[in-house]
Image (cartoon, helix red, strand yellow):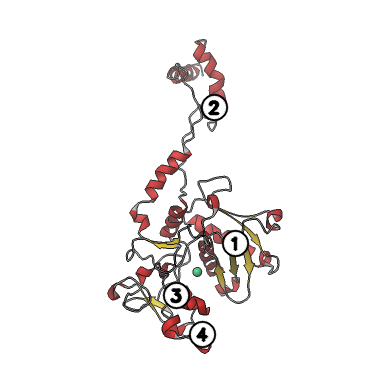
Amino acid sequence: MAIISAVLRAVLLLAVVAVRACPRLNEEPPFESLRHQARVNVSHPEVQKRYLSITGLSPQNRLWYKASIMYCYDTDTNARAIIEPFMADAWNLWIMAGLPQGTLTDPNGFAFVEATAAWCGDTSKKFLLITANQNMQAFTTPGWRAPSSRSTLSFDPNMGGGVRQKTLAILAHEIGHAWGMLHEHQRPSAWSSNDAFGGTASPLAAQVTFNCENLADYQATVAAGGVPTLFCKNRAAAQSLGSSAANFLPWQTFFETGYRTTQEGRNFDWSSIMLYDSRTGSKAGGGNVLVTGLLKLSIAETLVPSPADVSALQLLYGVVQARPLPCFYWQSCSPFNAFFHALLPQVCSGSF
Ligand SMILES: [Zn+2]
């Protein structure tokens, strides 16, 4: 023991000799600098190649302040009882995929938390309203909206067909919308420029083909006076008619400001949680709606956010997970901090 004690004392002496000059040992605030550095990394073109999202600049759809969404369950639709059993697990799909989780006070992660009852009871407050529907529908306003037009996520858990994994995937897709993600297949670069869709790809390079006539609401839209050469071709026209084709057709950035695409025509993400599979929106017994471009193959269902989905949100919000930082003994995060500061005066006075 005596030998060990002597060795420890020697090591301690060596350690404190190094700081005998007694510099100012202020707490270091490394997070901002690390965050800046990581921002540079995450802005690398490899990440920028894909994703379609809101810009955060449109007055209608903005980014959530400090990457924090507080949500409230709609009491009128009994949303808590219907959706809460899926909410935490759906959000966890994003976290498991690598999205850094934060808190309302932590700028280095994404916070997705339920607001207090008092907050939810005040209609002037900012929050995402979670509503339940029984129409086998899921729809979400992309990004943050002012309380006057209320950011909303509406969901029917029956959309998963009783398969929890699918229900969670659809809800995770909606959560992606809530943060500001748009559909991967609505990138103009995924569509042929030859088909009057507003696409920008050469016909051979188009990623998707759209079988509009297989939409569940195709006949109803035609019966209501919709002209297929318009609502099956132009997203804005489909939107004005209330046709589900608006969820498929490409955004036309020349006409619809507030959205952006990056690096058109490359790196389409077939594993994105924001991509429809071929059966999405199809009529009962009908064929595929969205298929691959040239070969017209079925598009598989995605069940978890992809790495590019996670990177896209991090890039959009400028939020990256801070690396685990070393805690030096002069910092309060160190378990030896109190011991060190107790020892410091003796070291500086030479009495140690
Ligand atoms: Zn969607």
| Residue type indicated by callout 1 | Met
Q: Nearer the viewer, mark 1 or mark 4?
A: 4
Find disc 3 in the rendering and name its residue.
235
Mark 3 burial class by Cα count in 10 Å: few <14, some 14-19, many 20+: many
Image location of residue 334, percent across then percent down? 53, 31
What SS does tag 4 mark? helix
Q: Dots 1 and 2: beta carbons under 8 Å?
A: no
Q: Earlier in the sequence, mark 4 or mark 2?
A: 4
Tell me how far mark 3 sits from mark 2, CA to CA.
61 Å
Tell me how far mark 3 sits from mark 4, CA to CA.
14 Å
For label 2, being within 8 Å of ligand 1 is answered no
- Return the residue nearer the eye: 189 or 10: 189
What SS does tag 3 mark? helix
Identified at 54% across, 27% down, the residue is 337
Above or below, 274 against 3 in this view is below
Q: Earlier in the sequence, mark 3 or mark 4?
A: 4
What SS does tag 2 mark? helix
- Say which mark, if any, is on residue 96: none
Find disc 1 in the rendering and name its residue.
87
Find disc 4 in the rendering and name its residue.
221
- Return the residue nearer the eye: 280 or 69: 69
- Say which mark, if any, is on residue 337: 2
Q: Earlier in the sequence, mark 1 or mark 4?
A: 1
